[in-house]
Amino acid sequence: MSKGKFKNSKFVEKYSIFIVLLAMFILCAVMNENFLSVNNLTNVARQLSVGTIIAYGEMLLVIAGLIDLSVGSVLALSGVLSIACYQSTGSLVLALVLAVVIGVLCNLVNAVLVTHFDVPAFIATLAMQTMARGAALLYTKGQNLLQLKDFTIFGQGSVGPIPMPIIFMVVITIITWYIMNHTRYGRSLYAIGGNEGAAIASGINVKKNKYITYIINGVFAGIAGVLFMSRVNAGLPNGAVGYEMEGLTATIVGGTSFSGGVGTTMGTLAGAFIIGFLNNIMNLTGVDSYVQQIVKGAIIAFAVVLDIRSKNKKTRKVILVADDTKKEEAK
Amino acid sequence: MKKKVISVLLCAAMVATMAIGCSKSDSGSSDDKKDSGDKKDSYKVAYIARAQSDSFAAWLANELKAEFENYDDMTLEVFDGEANDEKENTMIENAISSGFDGIIIQANNGEAQLPYIQQVVDAGIPCITTNPRVECEGTGSIDADPYEQAKVNCDLAIDQIPENAKVVVLLGPAGNFHSTERRNAWEKEFFEKRPDVEILAEDIANWNKDEAMALMEDWVQAYGDIDAVVSMNDNMAAGAIEVVKDNDKFKDMLAYGVDGTAEACLLIKEGKMTSTGLQSAIDLAKMNAEAIHSVLTGEKKITDINDNVPAPLITSDNVDEYIQMYKDNGQIKE
């Protein structure tokens, strides 16, 4: 293979997701005149915010070779407890803090199971999924919490013309991007996911980093819980079922490799927007809901095939490639 | 060393959390058991709930528990079918072998539970199917009629929805009996009689408020004007209303639901929702308890039990009495 061709394929591989996003954006704009309206684009961003925040948590975990299947339930638990806290104390700050604490506590349990008891992340978080959902239902006796009053500010308020959920999403995007690109922790995640044994051998504290990853995921889940409940103006103990899959879908469509070691923040954001635009344009043009499901499934399969094809030249030495990317970015 | 300490602490926290969780749920079920064990000539009744995670099913289970407290000679144990046919069927089999005197079943899927309901009948245990009714010889049934619940809304809407109105329709899960029946009622009792009304969009929001919100946000962009929201339940209607509640352009939008949830009552009170057909878990619980009691004490035969709870229409005219009902059971706070 010539060097030029290799470079070319690297370019496509690196930016393919953004090319898809751009193509999709143009296609949607052509298909429906309402798509480009400021209101509609704001709607899409607002609808995406919770899923995207969750997707960042999943991205960190998947890059490190982990996963979180509990995030939908943890989101619901932290959301309803946060509302209960607001209703009894009247403090929005306390409510937000409590949601984050609950998210972190649940994820600490995940982390303990995964790192200290070697329970596969898939199983450990599946257990937490059931426990957290059960706790949310137990606390609310299965009923929706109502009369949220000012709690709705997180999901429905806005600063100037920009809705609060979008502000949360942007801030968390920047934080995640910074973590992944400018911290030792971020870089070590690629190494752990690429080859855990090699990462340990090279002196990376794998256990500590796994803990940090779950804790960050917990913080995101807590915030997402507050945004979700606040947006729907109700504490839904059975809300956000299956949101882990929404987060994972955005992550995977955005180019994060399920086998670990590969993935970018901007890719995940692009993945979330691809799914969001897709949902939006199908609703705007009145596509039948059964057909919508088929199309969504097909797009996910297509995205992953693309991902595997563009990355199949990468062997198990992902860690080296990931490091190369870092060096290139540093330049 | 530090790590070990941390891990021990975390484990302790985890165990403590579990213990708190378990002890809470234990206290609930041990109460039930104590009651049933202590009294010798008391009847043990099992209630197999469709899914405790479904807010209506959970409400019904809560009301049944409360209703059974009023009986000295009858106790209730609740089992959760977790919206899963396999689990629900197992629960029914377990209830038969545990020697309950009566079994009330809220089927997840009538067809799937039918052979197991037949087993209850074959074992000679009085069996009531409720919400939904399952047709099976030898059983009794107490239900709400989903067609009727939607029809009471249609009767109001037929004069209320303006000429050439544009409406959107929100549906429950595909193939769900109650969603399908309610939609049938809207078709026969409203859309067929009002051919001038145009359905702009119709989609599944799975009974969920958040899914209905996302759909409504997109529909508002796509169609601009929406005169009415026709929803198969209140949660979804509330989601649609949430999207346009502060938008002056939609202040005259009509919205119809079914269930009569606490949230719907508050929205009707605020003038944001038009009407809903009540499916009262309180009434269902009361009638189920009365029915099974009368059968166990020999007053009635199980096959004589065949009733529907009424489906009263809730509008701004009578919403206060229902808000009071929810205040009494704690779902609405002052």
Image: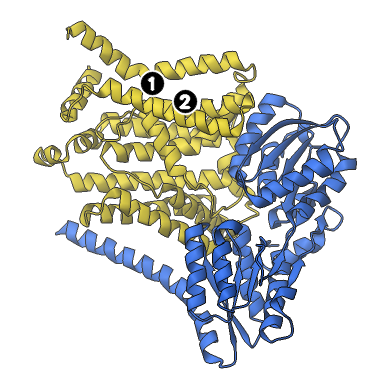
Relative placement, left or right, of B200 versus A291 is right
> Quick one: B309 or B316, which is closer to the camera?
B309
* Residue B109 visible in the current orientation: no
Q: Which x, y percent locates residue A155?
A: 57, 41
Tag shown at residue B313: none
Q: Which x, y percent locates residue A306?
A: 34, 22
**Label 2 environment density (alpha carbons within 10 Å; few <14, some 14–19, many ≥20):** many
Q: How is the image coloured?
A: by chain
Q: Quadrant of residue A145?
A: bottom right
> Quick one: A42 or A250, which is closer to the camera?
A250
Rendered blue, the chain in question is: B
* Residue B233 visible in the current orientation: yes
View extreme (left): residue:
A201
Residue under label 1: A17
Q: Which x, y percent locates residue B247?
A: 73, 34
**Mark 2: amino acid:** Ile
Secondary structure beneath label 2:
helix
Secondary structure beneath label 1:
helix
Tag shown at residue A274: 2
Instruction: Write the residue at 38% across / 36% down.
Output: A56
**Disc 2: which chain?**
A
Separation of residues labelled 2 and 1 (CA atoms): 9 Å
**Disc 1: which chain?**
A
Whether pointer 2 and pointer 1 mark residues with C-beta atoms closer than 8 Å, the reply is yes
Chain A appears what colour? yellow
Closer to the chain start, of discs 2 and 1, is 1
Total count of labels: 2
> Quick one: B25 or A157, which is closer to the camera?
B25
Q: Quadrant of residue A176?
A: top left
